[in-house]
């Protein structure tokens, strides 16, 4: 199993090119199930998660071809199977999003429930009630969802989500694009990934309007066709490197960024004393002075993303003063706090609140990644810590960060990967 070894204390200087967004790419891959023609995705991140989903799609009958220059071609000329087995779904929740496209195209599907995960129980009730609203009969048995569309296929409906859900909004958009008649989704997630997915669907011949707002209207069409689409930049990767630069100090230019996607982060970083210069297609992050503590609360977009909370906590452990961090999206997303404490951070967790008392002189230690975003928070803390930090269970990191050690090393960080059998 690999570890990441960081020798802290180097200021960062250089440029990092941001990859395509994992959380958009995964749903775009699922969209390939909606048509028998090729979907050609560019700027695809190469990640463990996109590979997992590639395996499931291949099992379902999709031809999945990685091409040079971060392109991925997918073609579901014929769906071979509408059964998504536990072993191919449990590794990654986003796999569950094949349910809606299979139902919409084939009229039935049997998909494993994804189960809980380290950050919370993460139910799928909103996904299932959206499919039911579109006319599907849903039955749960032996850990599987058995779903069947009515005669003539899914039909448009008005769906008011009782709470904002990224996954359920995306899933409903995918399924409704092939339903008969109009679907109106209300209280939708407004994350930039919604717009990316809706625009890709429209390039495939769908009629989706309003993505990025609370109300999305979809006029169902009979068939979708192939398209070429470029995945939107990863705003979470952007935020992680911005905070790495802020933690280590120095000056880093992030390229391939849509700066509006991270407005909540820029506001807080500026308050914390980090210089943020927005540029066309990028951002310059510079920190030379002392970091100041600021409070933060996660919220659905355009609020501060839960996926950047761990990284922000690492940064706040270096800041002068007390920062109160409140997690409002997932009930158990503070597992990085005890690991950050191993590096010397002073963090008290009470319920959904973490109180971080800085500034702490972090010292390198052995730490363990517990989930994807937690793992990158440990790397960020390691960059600012004195001495050597060894992060184990790096497979979490590989789910969502492409060539992290190369990108950071190019900016002068002393970061390398080692495997248990030797360095490499
Ligand atoms: C997406 O998860 C992302 N994953 C998450 O990123 C991200 O943290 C999250 O959105 C919030 O932004 C992907 O896109 C693959 P939700 P998702 O449905 O869709 C509850 C990462 O690190 N809920 O918006 O699962 C749920 O438990 C990952 O890249 C229900 O109760 O998030 C949570 O409390 C981690 N019932 C809240 O809603 C449901 O049916 C928001 O979850 C669905 C969700």
Image (spheres, rainbow, N blue to C red):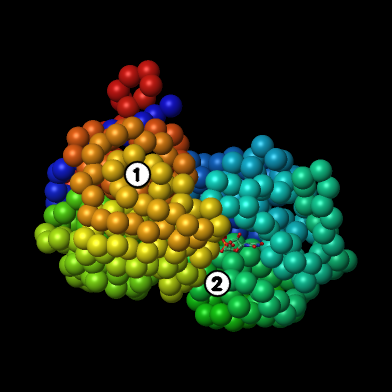
For residue 349, which quarter of the picture? bottom left
**Residue 332 seen by the camera:** yes
The residues tagged by marks 2 and 1 sit, at their Cα atoms, a distance apart of 33 Å
Residue sitting farthest toward the left: 288
Question: Which residue is labeled 1 in the image?
Answer: 341
Q: Return the disc, 2 or 1, that comes first in the chain's sequence.
A: 2
Q: Is residue 341 left or right of residue 179?
A: left
Residue at horizontal 43 percent and vertical 34 percent from the top: 393
Q: In the rendered view of the protein, which quadrant contains the C terminus?
A: top left
Question: Which residue is labeled 2 in the image?
Answer: 189
For residue 406, which quarter of the picture? top left
Q: Is residue 312 left or right of residue 351?
A: left
Of 112 and 349, nearer the camera is 349
- Above-or-below relation of 18 to 199: above
Residue 178: x and y in percent read 70, 68
Residue at horizontal 51 percent and vertical 65 percent from the top: 328
Q: In the rendered view of the protein, which quadrant contains the N terminus?
A: top left
- Above-or-below relation of 371 to 7: below
Query: CB of residue at label 2: within 8 Å of ligand 1?
Result: yes
Q: Is residue 307 left or right of residue 15?
A: right
Q: Ligand 1 is found in which quarter of the picture?
A: bottom right
Q: Which class describes the residues within 10 Å of circle 1: few (<14), some (14-19), or many (20+)?
A: some
């Amino acid at each position: 199993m690999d570890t990441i070894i960081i020798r802290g204390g180097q200021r960062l200087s250089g440029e990092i090119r941001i990859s395509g967004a994992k959380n958009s790419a995964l749903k775009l891959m699922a969209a390939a199930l909606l048509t028998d023609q090729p979907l050609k995705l560019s700027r695809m991140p190469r990640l463990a998660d996109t590979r997992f989903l590639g395996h499931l799609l291949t099992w379902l009958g999709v031809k999945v071809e990685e091409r040079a220059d971060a392109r991925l071609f997918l073609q579901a000329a014929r769906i071979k199977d509408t059964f998504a087995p536990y072993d191919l779904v449990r590794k990654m929740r986003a796999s569950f999003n094949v349910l809606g496209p299979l139902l919409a195209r084939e009229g039935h599907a049997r998909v494993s429930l994804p189960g809980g995960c380290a950050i919370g129980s993460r139910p799928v009730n909103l996904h299932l009630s959206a499919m039911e609203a579109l006319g599907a009969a849903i039955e749960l048995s032996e850990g599987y969802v058995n779903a069947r569309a009515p005669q003539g296929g899914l039909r448009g409906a008005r769906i008011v989500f009782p709470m904002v859900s990224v996954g359920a909004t995306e899933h409903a958009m995918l399924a409704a694009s092939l339903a008969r008649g109009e679907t109106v989704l209300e209280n939708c997630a407004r994350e930039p990934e919604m717009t990316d997915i809706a625009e890709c669907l429209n390039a495939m011949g769908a009629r989706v309007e309003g993505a990025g707002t609370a109300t999305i209207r979809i006029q169902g069409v009979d068939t979708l066709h192939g398209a070429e689409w470029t995945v939107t930049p990863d705003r979470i990767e952007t935020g992680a490197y911005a905070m790495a630069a802020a933690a280590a100090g120095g000056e880093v230019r992030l390229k391939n960024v849509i700066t509006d996607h991270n407005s909540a982060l820029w506001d807080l970083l500026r308050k914390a004393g980090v210089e943020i210069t927005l540029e066309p297609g990028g951002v310059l992050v510079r920190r030379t002075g002392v970091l100041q503590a600021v409070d933060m609360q996660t919220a659905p977009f355009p609020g501060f993303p839960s996926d950047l909370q761990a990284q922000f906590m690492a940064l706040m452990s270096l800041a002068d003063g007390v920062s109160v961090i409140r997690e409002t999206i997932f009930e158990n997303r503070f597992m990085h706090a005890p690991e950050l404490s191993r590096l010397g951070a002073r963090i008290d967790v009470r319920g959904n609140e973490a109180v971080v008392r800085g500034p702490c002189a972090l010292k390198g230690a052995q730490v363990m990644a517990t989930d994807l975003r937690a793992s990158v928070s440990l790397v960020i803390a390691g960059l600012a810590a004195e001495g050597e930090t060894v992060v184990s269970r790096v497979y979490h990191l590989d789910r969502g960060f492409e060539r992290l050690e190369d990108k950071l090393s190019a900016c002068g960080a002393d970061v390398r990967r080692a495997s248990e059998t030797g360095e490499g």
